[in-house]
């Protein structure tokens, strides 16, 4: 009888302890990593607001990839061409990027993060249109600088009227 009671008590103790061990604490980004990301976001906001394809492409590693809504773009040279072609058709203003509050996360010499963005676009015969969406990015250290190695993004559809 005592053995069964003891086994039951041990079983209860384990069942109460397991959820505690299963809970994972959200990692806290370091101040240094947040400063890295803040600098990259400011650099990107400035490049978008200046409609500067060269500055946008310079933010990427040589072997970077952007996954867009129309497919991936590989390499800094192709990324610069994509931005140059886009900026011939559309003027960007009011670009604001923002990491979410638990980003970025360190992985060796890389950072990964996600967040949201917004801007205003205007064409020659249309606009202005407000757009917003979400992104995820992997940044890599190249010497003393940080560059985007991978960027994915989406455009959030406007609310139904």
Image (tube, grey):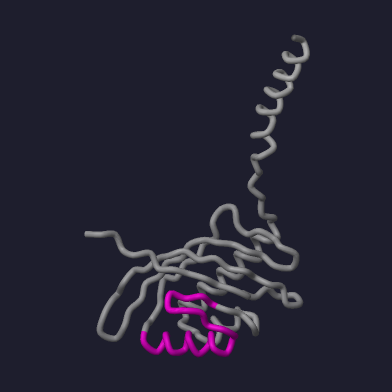
Q: Residue 159 in the image: x percent, y percent?
A: 29, 59
Q: Residue 67 in the image: x percent, y percent?
A: 51, 75
Residue nearer the viewer, 147 or 2:
2
Q: Residue at x 60, y 57 (%)?
A: 103
Residue furthest out toward the left: 161
Q: Quadrant of the C terminus?
A: bottom left
Does residue 40 appear left or right of residue 107 in this picture? Answer: left
Residue nearer the viewer, 24 or 109:
24
Q: Residue 128 in the image: x percent, y percent?
A: 30, 74
Residue nearer the viewer, 46 or 127:
127
The answer to whether residue 20 is above or below residue 127 is above
Q: Residue at x 40, y 89 (%)?
A: 88
Q: Residue at x 56, y 70 (%)?
A: 42
Q: Quadrant of the N terminus?
A: top right
The total number of labels drawn is 0
Does residue 106 appear left or right of residue 153 in this picture? Answer: right
Corner quadrant of residue 34? bottom right
Q: Residue at x 65, y 84 (%)?
A: 62
Q: Is residue 69 magenta?
A: yes
Residue furthest out toward the top: 1
Magenta-colored span: 66-89
Corner quadrant of residue 156? bottom left
Q: Residue 117 in the image: x percent, y percent?
A: 46, 65
The answer to whether residue 37 is above or below residue 53 is above
Corner quadrant of residue 20? top right
Q: Is residue 156 magenta?
A: no
């Amino acid at each position: 009888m005592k053995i069964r009671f003891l086994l039951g008590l041990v079983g209860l103790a384990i069942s109460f302890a397991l959820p505690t061990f299963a809970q994972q604490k959200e990692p806290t980004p370091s101040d240094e990593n947040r400063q890295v990301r803040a600098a990259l976001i400011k650099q990107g906001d400035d490049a978008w607001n200046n409609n500067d394809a060269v500055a946008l492409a310079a933010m990427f590693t040589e072997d970077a990839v952007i996954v867009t809504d129309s497919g991936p773009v590989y390499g800094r040279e192709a990324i610069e061409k994509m931005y140059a072609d886009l900026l011939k058709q559309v003027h960007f203003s009011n670009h604001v990027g923002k990491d979410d509050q638990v980003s970025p996360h360190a992985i060796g010499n890389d950072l990964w993060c996600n967040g949201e963005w917004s801007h205003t676009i205007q064409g020659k015969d249309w606009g202005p249109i407000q757009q917003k969406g979400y992104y995820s990015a992997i940044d890599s250290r190249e010497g003393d600088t940080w560059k985007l190695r991978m960027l994915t993004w989406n455009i959030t559809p406007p609310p139904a009227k």
